Amino acid sequence: AASASSSSSSASGVEDRGQRFTLAAGEGRVHDSWLQVALERGSAVRVVRSQRLQSAWAPACGLRYDGLYRVVRMERAADGSLRFDFRRDGAQPPLPPPRRRPP
């Protein structure tokens, strides 16, 4: 499984809903290509959330491993940026409860 860190603010392109999240990335970044490969192969991606993430699902401090997710969809925006949708794999321990109510 590849690894992904979710540490940006929602304004920077992460829409976090716990079991699912969307990551927006600029065209041509290194992680874009391996996320495309993960989508094509159906490979799992390890997700680590950071306290810097502006999300109810972020840890109170530091980093937290949140398990395996799959890239389930990729979409290209008019400006050339890519959006990747992730879904958490089943049969894992549940996520900790959100710190505040998810948007």
Image (cartoon, rainbow, N blue to C red):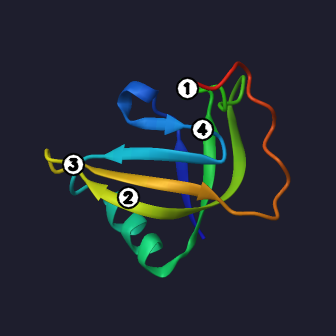
Q: What amino acid type should be assigned to the residue bearing mark 3?
A: Ala
Do callouts 2 and 4 mark residues in contact (Cβ within 8 Å)? no
Name the residue that disc number 1 marks. Answer: 52
- Camera-nearest label, 2 or 3: 3
Secondary structure at badge 2 equals helix
Looking at the image, residue 28 lies above or below residue 16: below
Do callouts 3 and 4 mark residues in contact (Cβ within 8 Å)? no
Q: Where is residue 18 in the image (x, y as percent from the top left)?
A: 65, 41
Looking at the image, residue 7 lies above or below residue 19: above
Within the image, what quadrant is residue 101 found in? top right
Q: Residues within 10 Å of mark 1 (few under 14, many from 20)?
A: some
Q: How far apart are marks 3 and 4 (CA)?
A: 21 Å
Question: In the rendered view of the protein, which quadrant contains the C terminus?
Answer: top right
Name the residue that disc number 4 marks. Answer: 17
Looking at the image, residue 34 lies above or below residue 62: below
Q: Using the image as rendered, state which of residue 51 and residue 38 is in the foreground.
A: 38
Please give the name of the residue rendered at 70% of the width and 29% of the height, measured from the top-left corner.
Answer: 59
Q: What amino acid type should be assigned to the residue bearing mark 2?
A: His
| Among numbered discs 4 and 1, the one appearing first in the sequence | 4
Q: Distance between the residues labelled 4 and 1?
A: 16 Å
Q: Using the image as rendered, state which of residue 64 and residue 19 is in the foreground.
A: 19
Looking at the image, residue 50 lies above or below residue 72: above
Q: What amino acid type should be assigned to the residue bearing mark 4?
A: Arg
